[in-house]
Image (spheres, rainbow, N blue to C red):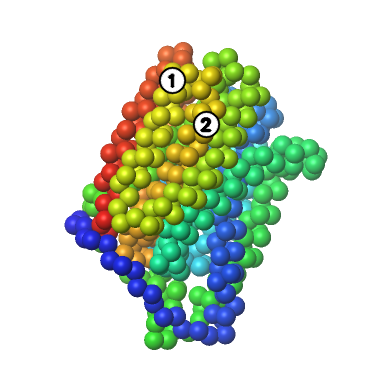
C-alpha cells in the first residue's frame, strides 16, 4: 500500500442534543482513564501471587509461567477481530462490553481448579485485546488535535494501574483474609466501576444524526484498505512487537537475573519496582514529545538506544549497575509503549483507520511479545546463564531502532 503525507486533522462539528450533554468531556476523560486503569491492573496483580497459586494448585514451573503468557498471547489473537466489532456495534458498546467481559474473566480466574484459572486468563487476554485496539481509535476520534497527548495520558494511566495492582495485591490478600483468590477477584470491582463510568458514552452514541455524522456512525464506517499490505504499518507493528517483547521479557526475569548474579532478592524486588515506577514518566512524556514533532524518527531510535544501553549494563555489571539499568530501562520501556501507541494515531488519517492499524499492530505486537518470557527462560535453562538471552535482547533492541526509524516518517497508512 502506498503511503502519503500526513494531513492536518480537521475539527468536526458535533450535533448537540440532551443526550450529548450527559457525556460531558470530563465524563469522557474519566471513562477513558478508568478503563485504562483496568487494562494492566489484573495482569500485574497476579505476578506477586504466582508462587502461591503454584503451590495451591500443584502446578509445575512451566504451567505457572503460562499464567502470565496466556493473556499476552490472546491479546495478539483477539486484536484483529476488534475493528469488525466496532464497525458493527460502535466503539462505545464494544468498550463497555469488553470491560464487563474483563471483569467476568477476573472472577472466572479465581474459581476452583486450574482449568478455570487458564480459562479466565484467556477471557482476560481477549478483553484487553479489544480495549487495546479500541482506545487509540476513540482517542483519534474524540481528540483529533491532541491525540498524541491523550495517548500519553491513557498509557500512563495503564502503567499506574499496573504499579498499583502489583503493590497492593499482597496487602489485599492479608486484609481480605481469603487467600490469593480474594485478592485477585477484588479487581473485578474496578472493572464494574469503569463500566458504570462508561455508560454516559453509550447514551451519547444514541444521539440522533444531524448535519455531522454522530460518533457511532464514525465508528461504524465502512472498512477501508487493509494496513496488512503497508510497509509503514509493518514497521509500526515491528516497533511495537519488539518493544513489547523487551518489556515482557524483563518484567518476567529482571529480578531473577539480578538474584542469580548475587543480589539479595529483596533488593532485586526494589530495583524492579523502581524500574516500573520510572516507566510512568516515560509513558507520559514521550507521547507528548511525539505530538510536537512532524517526524518521530530520532525519538524512536532514542527509545531503542536506551533499551540497548540498559540491557548492556545488565550484561556487563548486573549488580553494581542495577539501579542505573533500572532507571534507563524504565524510561525506555514506558516511552516505547507510549510512542508505539502514539504511532497508531499519528500514522492514521481517521478513527476507522486508527482502529485498523491498531488491530494489526497489536496483533503482531502481542504475538511477538508472548515469545519473549518463554524464549528467554528456555535459553537460560539451555545455557545455564543470562549472557545469551540478554545478548539476544540487545540485538533485538537494534532491530527496534531500525523499525522505529521507518515508523517515524511523516506519512499515514
Residue 384, horizontal then vertical, whole percent: 46, 13
Residue under circle 2? 326
Residue 132, horizontal then vertical, whole percent: 47, 53
Instruction: Tell me the quarter of the picture where residue 136 sits.
Output: bottom left
With 56 as the anchor, is 284 left or right in this view? left
With 284 as the anchor, is 357 left or right in this view? left
**Which residue occupies the foreground of this view, 148 or 205?**
148
Residue at screen point 68% across, 26% down: 55
Residue 7, horizontal then vertical, whole percent: 28, 66
Residue at screen point 34% across, 69% down: 9
Identify whether 197 is placed above or below 230.
below
Are there few (<14), some (14-19), or many (20+) residues within 10 Å of tag 1? some
Residue under circle 1? 315
First reached walking from the N terminus: tag 1 or tag 2:
1
Q: CA distance from mark 1 to mark 2?
A: 13 Å
Instruction: Tell me the quarter of the picture where residue 280 sits.
Output: top right
Q: Is residue 57 visible?
A: no
Identify whether 204 is placed above or below 55.
below
Are there few (<14), some (14-19), or many (20+) residues within 10 Å of tag 2? many
With 392 as the anchor, is 265 left or right in this view? right
Classify the position of the N terminus by image quarter.
bottom left
Classify the position of the C terminus by image quarter.
bottom left
Which mark is drawn over residue 411? none
Amino acid at each position: 500500500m502506498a503511503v502519503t503525507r500526513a494531513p492536518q486533522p480537521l475539527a468536526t462539528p458535533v450535533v448537540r442534543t440532551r443526550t450529548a450533554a450527559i457525556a460531558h468531556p470530563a465524563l469522557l476523560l474519566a471513562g477513558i482513564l478508568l478503563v485504562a486503569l483496568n487494562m494492566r491492573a489484573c495482569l500485574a496483580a497476579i505476578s506477586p501471587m504466582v508462587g502461591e497459586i503454584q503451590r495451591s494448585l500443584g502446578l509445575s514451573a512451566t504451567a505457572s509461567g503460562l499464567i502470565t503468557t496466556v493473556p499476552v498471547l490472546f491479546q495478539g489473537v483477539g486484536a484483529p477481530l476488534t475493528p469488525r466489532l466496532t464497525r458493527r456495534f460502535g466503539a462505545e458498546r464494544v468498550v463497555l462490553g469488553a470491560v464487563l467481559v474483563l471483569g467476568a474473566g477476573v472472577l472466572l480466574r479465581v474459581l476452583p481448579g486450574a482449568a478455570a484459572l487458564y480459562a479466565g486468563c484467556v477471557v482476560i487476554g481477549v478483553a484487553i485485546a479489544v480495549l487495546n485496539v479500541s482506545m487509540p481509535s476513540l482517542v483519534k476520534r474524540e481528540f483529533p488535535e491532541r491525540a498524541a497527548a491523550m495517548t500519553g495520558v491513557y498509557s500512563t494511566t495503564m502503567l499506574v494501574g499496573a504499579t498499583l495492582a502489583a503493590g497492593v495485591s499482597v496487602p489485599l490478600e492479608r486484609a481480605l483474609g481469603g487467600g490469593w483468590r480474594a485478592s485477585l477477584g477484588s479487581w473485578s470491582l474496578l472493572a464494574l466501576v469503569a463500566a458504570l463510568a462508561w455508560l454516559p458514552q453509550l447514551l451519547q452514541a444514541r444521539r440522533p444524526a444531524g448535519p455531522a455524522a454522530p460518533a457511532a456512525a464514525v465508528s461504524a464506517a465502512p472498512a477501508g484498505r487493509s494496513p496488512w499490505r503497508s510497509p509503514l504499518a509493518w514497521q509500526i507493528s515491528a516497533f511495537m512487537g519488539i518493544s513489547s517483547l523487551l518489556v515482557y521479557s524483563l518484567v518476567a526475569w529482571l529480578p531473577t537475573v539480578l538474584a542469580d548474579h548475587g543480589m539479595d532478592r529483596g533488593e532485586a524486588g526494589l530495583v524492579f519496582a523502581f524500574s516500573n515506577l520510572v516507566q510512568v514518566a516515560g509513558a507520559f512524556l514521550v507521547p507528548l514529545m511525539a505530538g510536537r514533532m512532524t517526524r518521530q524518527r530520532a525519538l524512536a531510535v532514542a527509545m531503542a538506544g536506551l533499551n540497548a544501553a540498559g540491557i548492556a549494563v545488565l550484561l556487563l555489571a548486573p549488580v553494581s549497575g542495577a539501579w542505573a539499568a533500572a532507571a534507563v530501562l524504565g524510561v525506555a520501556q514506558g516511552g516505547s509503549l507510549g510512542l508505539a501507541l502514539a504511532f497508531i494515531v499519528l500514522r492514521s488519517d481517521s478513527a476507522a483507520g486508527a482502529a485498523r492499524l491498531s488491530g494489526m499492530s497489536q496483533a503482531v505486537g502481542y504475538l511477538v511479545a508472548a515469545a519473549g518470557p518463554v524464549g528467554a527462560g528456555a535459553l537460560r535453562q539451555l545455557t545455564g546463564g543470562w549472557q545469551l538471552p540478554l545478548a539476544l535482547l540487545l540485538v533485538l533492541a537494534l532491530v527496534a531502532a531500525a523499525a522505529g526509524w521507518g515508523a517515524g516518517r511523516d506519512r499515514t497508512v
